Image: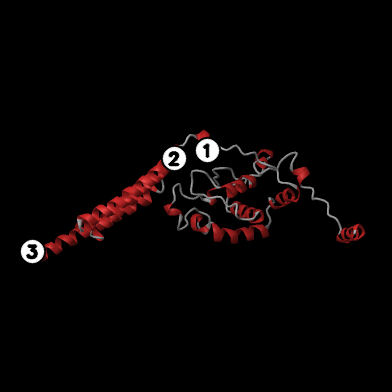
Amino acid sequence: MASKQHNADHRKTYFVVWMMLLVFTVITVWVSYHNYGVFNIVVAMGVATVKATLVCLFFMHLKYDNRLNQVVFVASFVFLAIFVGLTASDELFRPVEAVAKVEAVRPPAGNQAALMEKLRNSTPSLIAKGKEIYLSQCMACHGAEGKGNGPAGAALNPTPRDFTSGLWKQGGTPAQVFKTVSDGMAGTPMPPFESLSVADRWALVHFIRSLSPNTPADTPETLKLIGLGEGVSAVSSQALPEIPVDFAIDRMVKEK
């Protein structure tokens, strides 16, 4: 009789813990839609820690385990917390002066500037290429239709940009979107995509803009963000002179 009561108590405990895990899962999704600034990681780790603790205590039976095993298990997390805390204190509270970087935007040189000038004009072929890149690089977070509802986006805070809304946090001109794609967005999960070629980034820019009802044109000020603009594009867009191959070979033969 005592054994049956014991089993019933355990089943009740497991059910209560399971319900608590479901509640915390709902909380996890709910907090992902709110921006707590520098405390984003603290809130996320706090909720995850509570859920993990419930699983370890009851479903992994740590609550009923040998006392020594409990101490060793908890101690490992204490050392992990110390390591994370020391790293976070340096990352989150370092003086701004110590990490600020003043980087001048250098104008692209020669043929690269001419290529940038050419690629920043949208074409159907660039949009089609950009769609292929988007589906492989961006869809997981921003969704197949660019609405910010990708499967990986639900766990991000702030949530990914809905390109169909027409709202741009850092501007929606071609140059501004190109800079965002290239450099990422500080304080958000948006990473830089500098590993993509310039052509691929521009193709991605044109596809992203094709999803939005708000596609402003560049101005001299926005072009300067990527090293183009007045006094730069006019000179840079001139391709470097090319030497005919036959002429170069003839000169090499004569110099021998």
Q: Would you call the spot at circle 2 few (<14 residues within 10 Å), some (14-19), or many (20 or more)?
A: few
How far apart, in angstroms, are the residues tagged by discs 2 and 3? 55 Å
Tell me, for residue 90, which label it has, or none: 2
> Depth-wise, is mark 2 or mark 3 nearer the camera?
2
Q: Amino acid at mark 2?
A: Asp
Visible in this render: residue 197? yes
Q: Give the tally of numbered discs.
A: 3
Instruction: Identify the secondary structure beneath mark 1.
Output: helix
Q: Amino acid at mark 3?
A: Ala
How far apart, in angstroms, are the residues tagged by discs 1 and 2? 11 Å
- Residue 245, by quadrant, is bottom right
Quadrant in which the C terminus appears = bottom right
- Single out the residue that lies furthest toward the right: 254
Visible in this render: residue 213? no
Q: Would you call the spot at circle 3 few (<14 residues within 10 Å), some (14-19), or many (20 or more)?
A: few
Instruction: Identify the secondary structure beneath mark 2.
Output: helix
* Foreground pick, 84 / 166: 84
How far apart, in angstroms, are the residues tagged by discs 3 and 1? 64 Å
Left or right, 22 with respect to 251, comes to left
Left or right, 50 with respect to 239, comes to left
> Depth-wise, is mark 3 or mark 1 nearer the camera?
1
Residue 243's spot in the image, x, y percent? Answer: 85, 55
Quadrant in which the N terminus appears = bottom left
When the figure is inspected, residue 236 is found, relative to residue 252, above or below; the finding is above
Residue 188's spot in the image, x, y percent? Answer: 49, 46
Tell me, for residue 1, which label it has, or none: none
> Which residue is denoted by mark 1 in the rendering?
99
Q: Would you call the spot at circle 1 few (<14 residues within 10 Å), some (14-19), or many (20 or more)?
A: few
Of the image marks 2 and 3, the number of the one nearer the N terminus: 3
> Which residue is denoted by mark 3 in the rendering?
2
When the figure is inspected, residue 148 is found, relative to residue 103, above or below; the finding is below
* Foreground pick, 125 / 231: 231
